[in-house]
Amino acid sequence: MTVLENVRLVLEEFTKLPKEAMDFIARVKLKLVDLADACHKMPSELSGGMQKRVAIARAMALDPEIVFLDEPSAGLDPITSADLDQLILSLAQNLNITFIMVTHELPSIFTIADQVIMLDKVTKTIVARGRPDELRDHSDNAWVRQFFNRNPSGETNQ
């Protein structure tokens, strides 16, 4: 499928809109992620960052209030990752979309997140919740401070 068909697929599955309307919506969503000129390309012809933006356009096809992202900048170089962070932030602010994102990328967390929830991988419970800077600087949990300060194992900020 082309990039346009890929974004349109969600509309085909969940609406009864005419094809012309679906194409229009798909084009609008691609324009929102700066890929208006990529409609007729195959995803394999796009860079990793562009493929991630197509996925975001597809996720926004039905105008959701909440979009879930799983490690959106995984595999991207630092510049492309920063560009993707700015895109997500812009979409959140301008379209009033809530993005819920799973990531370990500290720059992304500090750029995008209003609130962070950290889970304990052993107990599968919440160990911290708050603004990234508050957790980094003031968490009662040493492991949380260690994570946000990117300290090596055994070294924590007291």
Image (cartoon, rainbow, N blue to C red):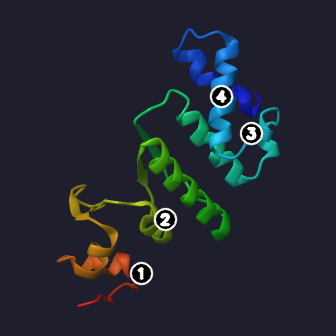
Task: Compare marks 2 and 4 and give the one earlier in the sequence.
Answer: 4
Left or right position of 45 against 146: right
Label 2 and label 3: CA atoms lie apart by 25 Å
Please rate how many residues cluster around mark 1, counting C-alpha atoms within 10 Å: few if below 14, some from 14 to 19, many from 20: few
Residue located beneath label 1 in the image: 150
Left or right position of 46 against 99: right
The numbered disc on residue 26 is 4
* Quarter occupied by residue 140: bottom left
Left or right position of 18 against 103: right
Instruction: Point out the frontmost of discs 2 and 4.
Output: 4
Task: Compare marks 4 and 1 and give the one earlier in the sequence.
Answer: 4
Residue located beneath label 2 in the image: 108
Please rate how many residues cluster around mark 4, counting C-alpha atoms within 10 Å: few if below 14, some from 14 to 19, many from 20: many
Residue 151 image point, x, y percent: 39, 85
Residue located beneath label 3 in the image: 36
Q: Amino acid at mark 2?
A: Ser
Instruction: Point out the frontmost of discs 4 and 1.
Output: 4
